[in-house]
Image (cartoon, rainbow, N blue to C red):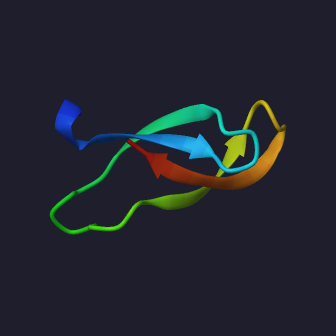
Amino acid sequence: MSQDNMVKMECKECKRTNYFTSKNKKVLKNRLELEKFCKFCKKHTEHKETK
């Protein structure tokens, strides 16, 4: 994966960075939000793209 397409995903509840994923920045202009499993909260939570 290319470094310029990588984005960090942060848990909305505990505010910890758990995931790194890629996105097409030409197609997706807004910040990415996904339901992912947080190993710190130990449940599925909403994760939001950070800088």
Instruction: Locate the N terminus and report the quarter of the image it occupies.
Output: top left
Left or right of 50: which side holds 18?
Answer: right
Residue 8: image location, x then y, percent: 44, 38
Query: Residue at 52% of width from left, 36% of height from top?
Result: 19
User: Does 34 appear above or below 13?
Assistant: below
Is residue 20 left or right of 25 when viewed as pictured? right
Using the image, determine if residue 9 lies above or below residue 1.
Answer: below
Residue 50, horizontal then vertical, whole percent = 45, 45
Q: Is residue 2 visible?
A: no
Do we see residue 17 in this rendering? Answer: yes
Q: For this view, does 20 lie left or right of residue 16?
A: left
- Closer-to-camera residue (44/47): 47
**Seen from this angle, which residue lies furthest right?**
42
Q: Position of residue 47 (x, y in %)?
A: 60, 51
Image location of residue 51, percent across then percent down: 38, 41
x 67%, y 50%: residue: 12
Which residue shows up at 76% across the image and 51% down it?
44
Q: Is residue 38 above or below residue 23?
A: above
Q: Is residue 50 above or below residue 17?
A: below
Asked which quadrant contains residue 40, the reply is top right
Q: Quadrant of residue 20?
A: top left
The image shows a total of numbered marks equal to 0
Q: Nearer the viewer, residue 48 or 38?
A: 48
